[in-house]
Structure formats: C-alpha cells, structure tokens
C-alpha cells in the first residue's frame, strides 16, 4: 500500500464509485478503499437476512417471504432518466457493458388524494383525468410549445427569451392552474421546491423535454430505467471498470484516516499501520465528519409486499411523486416500487420505499400519506438518516467530499453532485456527448 496515487477514494457509495471510474478513465492513478467488507456504503444493496439484521437485530426473517438471496433491496433506490445525464456517464465510461437495464413501467403523481399517470405530451394531456376540459386544452398548447422548442430555431421561441423570462412568466402566458403547475414542476421537471418558478424558464423547459424524450426512448410507461438486480450492481461495475484502467480496490480496511501535512492539506490515507500517499482525497461524509455539516434528515419506510401499488395499472416498477402542496408539507414525498421483474425480490414479491425530507421525529406518522397508498404490506421498516454537506475548502485541504443522498427516487440530483465534484477535482468539464443508443440494447432485452 506504500505507493503514491493521484487520488484516493474512500467509501464505495454510488457517487464515489462513479468518480473513481471517471478519474480512472481519465488516466489518473486511483486507490479506492472502504472500511466495510461490502460495496456500496450508504447506497448498498441488502439481501433479506442482511435487511432483517439491520432493522430487526438478530431475528430470523419469516420463511413466507422466500429465499434471502433472491432479495436485492437497495438502501438508496433511484430510477434513471433514460436520456439523462447519469445514463450518459454510464455510456461515457462504458460501464453499460457490465449492466442490463429494464424500462420502468409507470410514472405517477398524487393529486387530491388519488394517484394519476403523469401526462407528458400534448396527446396525453388531452386524455388526463388530472385536468378539466378547458385546462386540458391550455396544457396541450403548453406541451406543444415545449415539444417544439429548439435552442437554435428562433421561430420555435415564439418571441420569448427563456434565459430572461421566469418559469412563472412562461406558465402564466398559458394560463395554467396551480394544480397543473404542481404536477408539471414536481413530477415532470422533477423540482424539489417551487423556487424554480422565479428562475429563468430555460432549465424548466429543458427538464420537461428530457422527460418527454426519455419517455419516447423505450416506448414504456415511464421515462425511467433501472438495472436488473438493482443498483447494487453499479458499484461493482465501476470497480471492474477502475481495475481495467489500473485502479486498485481495497475493501475491509478499518480505521481509514486521512493524513494531513502542517498546512492542513491531505497528503495520504493511513490504515492498519500503512500509509498510501496521494495528491487528492475523495470521500463520503462519514470519512471526514469534522469537514461536513448536517443539513437535514431523510425519513423512509421500506416495505415488502405481495402486490403492486394500487391504482398504478398493476405496474411492477413505478415511481409516484407526492408534491409538497398536496400534503401541506415543505418537501415532496416519493414512492418507489420495484419487483421480481427487475430481479430485486422473489417471484410475486414487491419492494416499496416511501421517502421524504424529515420534518418531524416520527417517520411512521410523517410517511403515512405515502404508506396509506401501498395497500396491505407483508413487512414494513421505518428509518431516519442524517443528511450532510461538505463545509471545507478543497483549495486548501485537497479533500473532495460528496453530499449525502437526498430522498428523491430518481438520479438527477445525485449525478449533478458527481459532475460538479469531477470538475472541482480535475479542473475541467466532463464531456458527455455520447451516443445514447449504446444503452438501449440492454434495456430492450
């Protein structure tokens, strides 16, 4: 271990693994360590025995739930937008050859106590029971504007400069009702809060276009894809990738400690009496607790069920977004469901997650609007975890720390953090101009 590396990465969470892969592909010498004897850190994937041990202590799981090894329960479940940045990263690094994707069946939104399919284009807007007759027509016109909008075609702009007008201005031009804005902003454009309404409309329109293009890609019922066997496959795929480029992985290295020089700059990592030298350290918040601050908490319910979520057209995999206004909350709530069709549970079993930014200390009560939508569950576990963000100056200490995972059930915010970190570490932009069709063959199998 007494060697010098360009970068040492601590923790094998998704963000750390993606960065390790990207940096290895760039030709940097990377050492990747984890204090645990398994991949994934916070974003690990558990079988039934491990899940039971974590949430129920030493109890044995009931036999009625099926074989432990057939469960791959992701602790941080997130779907990927088919044309999104994360899929571009996977193609850019060629990690797609280690993974098989399958389209996700459904994308739904909660409105006035019920679940509805998210309408994503002009045709669906006209059919959607989410809106009354006149609102459907207004929404249809708005969707057509978004679909036709092209940066380099001024005719399609209809005299609007989306870099200058706000999303609110654009929406008011089409006279859309608050409930419509709610589902478009939170379930289509995937914003966490309503502050986007006062930002330039360009980002809003681009997010809507990404949703529609991703949806069209696989002709499925949603714009999302998910790997067979779940996200637990991803860290291992990136570990393989890193190894191909000469990176080194070491699991089960307890007491990994970052070593600093007299100026407070990271110069290496010590573990079990040996020190590996490096120029930069990349890690999750748990490895440098004095360089992060707590910014929130995530409440989650993890459920095992024997049926799909009701009112989702029997979807075997689905995301339901419950916008904050619908619940009288400060943050959205998310339902994630996946099943044996993605090989994450035995035949006939479904795994559902309900997640949100915790606003109280009572996850059972707080998550009730979401858990009530699930119907009968075989098992349910409640949990709260803290969310951290870095407070350090990487210019001084050469430490690059990822933020904890947020409660959303899609990858958009996670990958934004990764790309920003990549630019800080390397001083350059990540080139993501790739052929998106490279990920589709596996998705259609």
Image (spheres, rainbow, N blue to C red):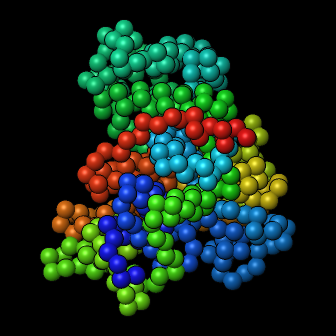
Left or right relative to 354: residue 14? left
Q: Is residue 339 above or below residue 116?
A: below
Quarter of image, res 284: bottom left
Most extreme residue toward the bottom is 273
Task: Give how far across and how far down residue 181 sits, in percent.
Answer: 46, 28
Asked whether the viewer can see residue 376, the reply is: no
Q: Residue furthest left?
A: 263
Q: Position of residue 211 (x, y in %)?
A: 52, 32
Tally of numbered discs:
0
Q: Position of residue 1 (x, y in %)?
A: 40, 81
In front of the other: 196 or 133: 196
In the rendered view, tell whether residue 404 sits above or below residue 52.
above
Residue drawn 25% across the image and 51% down it: 427
Quadrant in the picture for residue 29: bottom left
Residue 39 can be seen, yes or no? yes
Residue appearing at x 35%, y 78% in the figure: 3
* Residue 120 falls left or right of residue 392: right
Q: Nearer the viewer, residue 140 or 159?
A: 159
Image quadrant where one finds the C terminus: top right
Q: Position of residue 107 (x, y in %)?
A: 62, 37
- The residue most toward the right is 64
- Observer-nearest residue: 155 or 445? 445
- Residue at 51 percent across and 34 percent down: it is 435
424 relative to 19 in the view: left or right: left
Q: Residue at x 67, y 29 (%)?
A: 219
């Amino acid at each position: 271990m007494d060697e010098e590396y360009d970068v040492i990465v601590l923790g094998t969470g998704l963000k750390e693994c993606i960065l390790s892969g990207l940096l290895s592909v760039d030709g940097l010498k990377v050492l990747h360590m984890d204090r645990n004897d398994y991949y994934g850190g916070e974003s690990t994937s558990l079988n039934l025995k491990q899940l039971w041990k974590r949430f129920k202590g030493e109890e044995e799981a009931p036999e009625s739930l099926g074989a432990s090894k057939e469960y791959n329960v992701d602790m941080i479940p997130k779907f990927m937008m088919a044309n999104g940045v994360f899929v571009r990263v996977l193609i850019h690094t060629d990690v797609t050859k280690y993974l098989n994707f399958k389209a996700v069946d459904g994308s739904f939104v909660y409105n006035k106590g019920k679940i509805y399919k998210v309408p994503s284009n002009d045709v669906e807007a006209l059919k959607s029971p989410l809106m009354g007759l006149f609102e459907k027509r207004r929404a249809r016109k708005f969707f057509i504007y978004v679909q036709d909008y092209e940066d380099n075609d001024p005719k399609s702009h209809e005299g609007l400069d989306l870099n200058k007008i706000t999303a609110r201005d654009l929406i008011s031009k089409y006279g859309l009702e608050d409930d419509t804005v709610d589902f478009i902003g939170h379930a289509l454009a995937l914003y966490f809060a309503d502050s986007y309404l006062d930002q330039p409309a360009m980002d809003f329109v681009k997010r809507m276009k990404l949703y529609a293009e991703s949806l069209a890609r696989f002709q499925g019922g949603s714009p999302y894809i998910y790997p067979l066997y779940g996200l637990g496959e991803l860290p291992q795929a990136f570990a393989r990738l890193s190894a191909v480029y000469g990176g080194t992985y070491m699991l089960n290295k307890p007491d990994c400690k970052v070593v600093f020089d007299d100026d407070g700059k990271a110069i290496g990592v010590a573990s079990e009496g040996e020190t590996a030298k490096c120029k930069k350290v990349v890690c999750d918040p748990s490895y440098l607790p004095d360089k992060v601050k707590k910014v929130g908490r995530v409440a989650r319910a993890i459920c095992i069920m024997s049926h799909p979520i009701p009112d989702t057209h029997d979807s075997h995999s689905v995301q339901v977004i419950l916008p904050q206004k619908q619940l009288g909350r400060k943050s959205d709530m998310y339902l994630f469901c996946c099943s044996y069709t993605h090989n994450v549970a035995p035949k006939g079993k479904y795994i559902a997650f309900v997640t949100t930014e915790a606003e109280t200390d009572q996850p059972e009560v707080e998550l009730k609007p979401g858990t009530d939508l699930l119907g009968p569950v075989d098992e349910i576990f409640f949990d709260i975890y803290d969310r951290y963000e870095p407070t350090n100056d990487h210019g001084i200490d050469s430490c690059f720390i990822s933020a904890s995972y947020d409660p959303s059930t899609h990858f958009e915010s996670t990958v934004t953090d990764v790309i920003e970190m990549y630019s800080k570490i390397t001083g350059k932009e990540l080139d993501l101009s790739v052929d998106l069709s490279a990920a589709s063959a596996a998705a259609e199998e």
